[in-house]
Amino acid sequence: MTTSAPASAPESAVQRYSPLAMALHWLLAVLIIATFGFGVYMADLPFSPSRIKLYSWHKWAGVTILLLSTVRLLWRLGHRPPADAPMPAWQARAAHATHLLLYLLFFAVPLAGWAYSSAAGFPIVWFGVLPLPDFVPVDKALAETLKQAHKLLAFAMAGLVLMHIAAALKHQLMDRDGLLLRMMPARR
């Protein structure tokens, strides 16, 4: 594999991710950012039918993120990404560690939310059609612990997402190494 071309090289020389990898990346990015914002917004709402509806939507988004993350992980395990842009070794290690942690959180955050919902006694019915099994028993103390775990993991993921965005912008605007273009469709 060749390395990514610097920004001064023609855009056609940049080695890109596959169209499916790009689609999953951007779809999950939008869903994760929106679901996080939605979660922060709804957390302090007073109990009402609207709040219950918002919680259902949040759960549906979480299950969708979990499923799309599974597809993304399976795709990634079978398909090598483009070679990294030239960068100092510490940056490459930091990028790989961040990606590994993000993948871990793609699963941990929705699973903690699902467990919290189960422990609180509120089943998840995906899109109001498919009832999902509870995988922990109803237990108010456990529900409170899982609620805090879900919140902590979600904020950890938000922090890593911000770091990921900042690093991508640094590579694009300061290093001009074409790294961001790898996740963008080629212009025709």
Image (cartoon, helix red, strand yellow):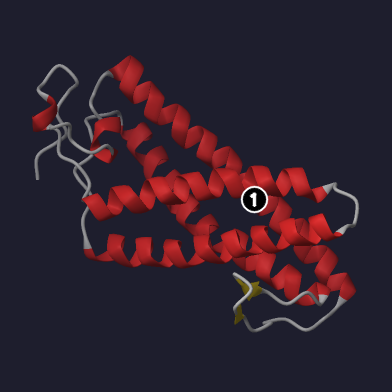
The residue nearer to you, when weighing 53 against 28, is 53
* Mark 1 burial class by Cα count in 10 Å: few <14, some 14-19, many 20+: many
Report which quarter residue 172 is drawn in. top left
- State left or right for residue 81 relative to residue 91: left
Q: Position of residue 86 (x, y in %)?
A: 22, 30
The residue nearer to you, when weighing 154 against 131, is 131
Q: Quadrant of the N terminus?
A: top left
Residue depicted at x 63% and y 46%:
36
Residue depicted at x 54% and y 49%:
32
Give the residue at mark 1.
154
Indicate the secondary structure of the residue bearing disc 1.
helix
> Is residue 157 something one can see in this rendering?
no
- State left or right for residue 108 relative to residue 96: right
Q: Position of residue 187 (x, y in %)?
A: 17, 31
Mark 1: amino acid:
Ala
Q: Is residue 59 above or below residue 124?
A: above
Q: Quadrant of the C terminus?
A: top left
Residue depicted at x 59% and y 38%:
159
Q: Is residue 32 above or below residue 6?
A: below
Q: Position of residue 45 (x, y in %)?
A: 85, 48
Residue depicted at x 24% and y 37%:
182
- State left or right for residue 106 relative to residue 176: right
